[in-house]
Image: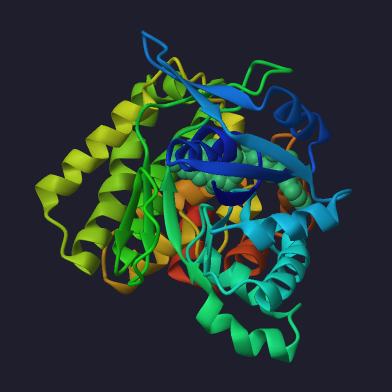
Amino acid sequence: MKQAVHFGAGNIGRGFIGALFSQSGYHVTFIDIADQIIQQLNEEKQYQVILATDQQETMTIDNVSGLNNMTQEKEVIDSIQQATYLTTAIGPNILPRIAPLIAKGITNRIKANEEKLYIIACENQISATDLLKGYILEHLDEDTKADLDAKVYFFNSAVDRIVPIQNNQGSLDVLVEPYHEWVVETSESIPPIEGMKIVSDLAPFIERKLFTVNTGHAVIAYLGFLEGKATIDEALADEKVEAQVHATLTETGDYLIKQYGLDRDEHNQYINKILDRFKNSYLNDAVTRVGRSPLRKLGPDDRLVRPAVEANKAGLSYTNLAKAIASALLFDFKEDEEAVKLQAMIKEHSVPHVLKEVSGLDEHSEITQEVVRQYNALKK
Ligand SMILES: NC(=O)c1ccc[n+]([C@@H]2O[C@H](COP(=O)([O-])OP(=O)(O)OC[C@H]3O[C@@H](n4cnc5c(N)ncnc54)[C@H](O)[C@@H]3O)[C@@H](O)[C@H]2O)c1
Ligand SMILES: O=P(O)(O)OC[C@@H](O)[C@@H](O)[C@H](O)[C@H](O)CO
């Protein structure tokens, strides 16, 4: 049986990427630090993916097992030796932490296995696989590096499926939305995986996804949080929030249409389809999950700042994106480590200082000035 090794047995890992491999006839070895999940995967050897619909259709995902990368390093290296695919859905900030072990796995594999290994990071981050490759290269010796190109292939990708935090303590089952899209950039002919779409240029796909799905999601999460709403569908039901999401997605849409020559009507349909996905109340998706890690989300290449910078460069409107950035700066959620850090930075310094440090924006830039205006207005 063909083997896939997947780092991150969390929501997207079990609910999307691992499920697609299993459905494509692969055995999936999940690698995670969550020992409880790993033990359960090895005992139960299967779980259910449940669709967030009226009917709650379920799919059984089998041929799965687990390894703990903190305690089973040798076994992880052995599993990489056997794998055709190695994927991750672990969070972009965690990629540097798993890179040394992947490097050991590659070093060992290259000596003994002529088969190609395909590595794909499935994270909400532009060029996530390139970043992972960079971290892995830091841990490879010169001989392995010389052999790498012919045997190990790195493909960037975009992943889209809303998988909320699960309210079923102690169960491996995962509730997911029916919609899913996994786009992988390659010109290689690779073993087919159900639900994987191959493209030669990922840029329009990942930017369209990140700056529509994730920008829209972030606006709803941060404004919803400020309005005291618990879930995304509840926040979107608020007329003010809905109007603000539309206005923000019009700005990212104008940039995307100009940059990639998209058809305006088709893009508007894409936006409307996404807003319908956000309205799915079966997901019960917490605004605090969607708003998680605000420092990452305020990064220069992420869903809020990059489209604002690009819109500004192209002479397009970015006022609503500035409001979205301002609302992210107001995400004062005590259970989120990055939110706590962000609030402490704002308190100790100032909003322009934070935007310089976190978002790479000049303290006197037009965008910073607009964000400060919006921040003060929202704070009232
Ligand atoms: N949930 C979604 O709707 C969704 C959709 C598309 C993309 N994504 C992206 O997928 C990635 C994962 O998101 P998620 O929602 O599945 O998160 P999650 O928290 O449910 O899963 C992450 C998993 O990684 C594990 N992990 C953390 N540190 C680790 C380490 N050092 N070694 C091994 N395992 C470790 C955690 O224990 C957890 O099981 C993120 O980049 C996210 O942006 C999420
Ligand atoms: O995973 P994050 O923290 O980058 O973003 C939160 C959500 O917007 C995200 O998980 C979406 O649910 C997902 O990207 C949908 O495909």
Percent x, y for residue 251?
29, 53
Q: Residue at x 48, y 60 (%)?
A: 305
Percent x, y for residue 237?
37, 19
Q: Is residue 203 above or below residue 2?
A: below
Residue 270: image quadrant is: top left
Looking at the picture, tell me which residue is in the foreground, 137 or 86: 86
Q: Total of numbered circles in the picture? A: 0
Looking at the picture, tell me which residue is in the foreground, 210 or 175: 175
Side of 5 relative to 51 (left or right)? right
Please identify the quadrant where the C terminus is shown.
top right
Q: Residue at x 82, y 35 (%)?
A: 35
Q: Is residue 300 visible?
A: no
Looking at the picture, tell me which residue is in the foreground, 69 or 328: 69
Percent x, y for residue 70?
86, 50
What is the basis of the colouring in this image?
A: rainbow
Side of 375 relative to 220 (left or right)? right
